[in-house]
Image (cartoon, grey):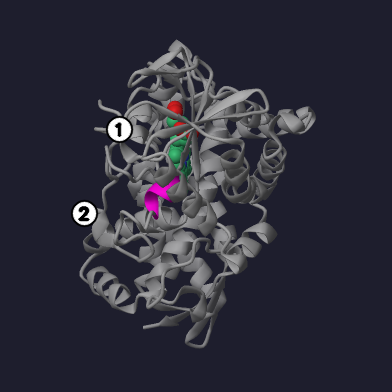
Amino acid sequence: MAISEGKRGLAHGSVTDLLALVTDMALPTLSKGVLRRRPRVVGLLENTGTEARGIRRLQALRQKYAGQAVLLSAFGRKHLILTDPAQVQYVLQQTPALFQSSSDEKTSALAHFEPGVSLVSDGTERQTRRNFNAEVLDEGCPMHSLSGPFRQVVRHEFGGLLSALQRGDDTHLSWEHFEAAWNRVIRCILLGTPARDDDALTAMLNKLRETGNWAFLHPGRKRLRRKFHDALQTHLDHADPSSLAGLAAQSPAQSKARPSDQFTHYMFAFDPGGMATFRALALLAAHPETLQVVRARLASGEDHADPLLRATLLESLRLWSTTPVILRQARIDIDWRGDTLPAKTQVVIYAPFFHRDDETLTEAHSFAPGLWPEGRVLRDTRFVPFSDGDGICPARDLVLMTGAMVLAELLGTHTAALQDPKRLDASRPLPPTLDNYTLAFHLTAA
Ligand code: HEM
């Protein structure tokens, strides 16, 4: 794999570059909360359009250093900022051989609630845990082996929600209602029906994630962590056969894979899945011609709409990355086209730049489901909503399947309009941030 044909070596960034990146990229990303979003900050970022600055900053850096990756030093640590999709693919494809997924920063943040998750494991432990996750999550299968029961869960929860909210022909759908139904679906998918109403479990994890936002700056909440894992383990022991816990119980790898830590991550990571689905609904509401195509396809059978719904979800993730920063750490001194990238350098992939770089991508700020033929996750491209290489998200198909089922349930019987259409005007560049917490819809039975 080549690192950006025709461009050589590493550029050494200045202190001014560092300060500009901290201001325009790092601070907005950290302040909105890396592991658990802070709704008020997300709202502020949408209102001020601040996140566009991170993309512009990286464009300026690319121009200044002719597309070389830029090495910076901060607080005694070296950081490599990637500015070219070929560099991104090189780093992701060379994980775990040359680059570790378990960067120090990621490890200290996730240690607050899931120290044994595959994402921050290394060596044979990582392999065992990754294999376990791939097996339970049915990695690479567009329809999970439990898609039948999962569809029933979605029907029950979102069909029920629509009936509960209906006032005459009009249904008002807010994030609060959507999130509550989404969380019930997720607990059933992960842990089975007995976990459906265990809101306390989700609340405990959310608190731990808030702590994780502070990484090593927070001493941790050991008692809460123990309480959460005890409660989770009780559900795992029950092993409802129509849930992922049931599959995990049959896995030969389960004794070595620390299932409780893997399931903690599953639960945590389905949260951005809900945000992406709600924003995908907003994209469809703002693009009535695509919404009409979706509804016509739904009318001729849910499966006909599935690829377009998945492409819409992928667009939601391209436009508003739920994992804006992917981190890797150089394992050893690495030869970077004639220069040396020092061991332990943290490599930073700022996904919004690669997804919405309007100097190189015509569709940067518009809704373009055609970028995702057949609604499939692309490999070896500039788009990395689920990462790539060995560290790619093993739940990418499950997430898209679940989100598409929810959208199908809502749109099979209703049309959707944004309560405030100005938030997403299809005739203008789509905003750099879309605050899911304050989005609301009118759903009309049709
Ligand atoms: C919108 C939803 C999601 C997105 C955008 C997403 C994205 C990602 C990304 C970008 C990574 C790589 C992170 C890194 O290398 O630092 C990742 C890893 C991972 N994701 Fe997801 N994810 C989502 C939902 C889920 C869900 C629902 C699950 C489980 C049910 C899951 C399980 C995992 C696991 C286990 C890993 C670690 C892979 C490894 O071993 O390295 N993700 N995800």
Please tell me whether mark 2 sits on a helix, a strand or a loop.
helix
Give, as a three-letter code, the residue at label 1. Lys
Q: Position of residue 349 (x, y in %)?
A: 45, 38
For this rendering, which residue is in front, 79 or 89?
A: 79
What mark, if any, has residue 7 been given in the picture?
A: 1
The answer for how far apart the CA atoms under marks 1 and 2 are is 34 Å
For this rendering, which residue is in front, 69 or 288?
A: 69
Tell me the residue at 42%/41% (across/down).
242
What mark, if any, has residue 374 been given in the picture?
A: 2
Q: Is residue 87 above or below residue 329?
A: below
What mark, if any, has residue 234 been given in the picture?
A: none
Q: Position of residue 192 (x, y in %)?
A: 51, 42
User: Does the image show residue 138?
Assistant: no
Quadrant housing the N terminus? top left
Q: Position of residue 22 (x, y in %)?
A: 62, 43
User: Does the image show residue 101?
Assistant: yes
Image side of residue 379 versus residue 53, left or right: left
Please tell me whether mark 1 sits on a helix, a strand or a loop.
loop
Which residue range is magenta in the image?
351-356
Q: Earlier along the polypeptide chain: callout 1 or callout 2?
A: 1
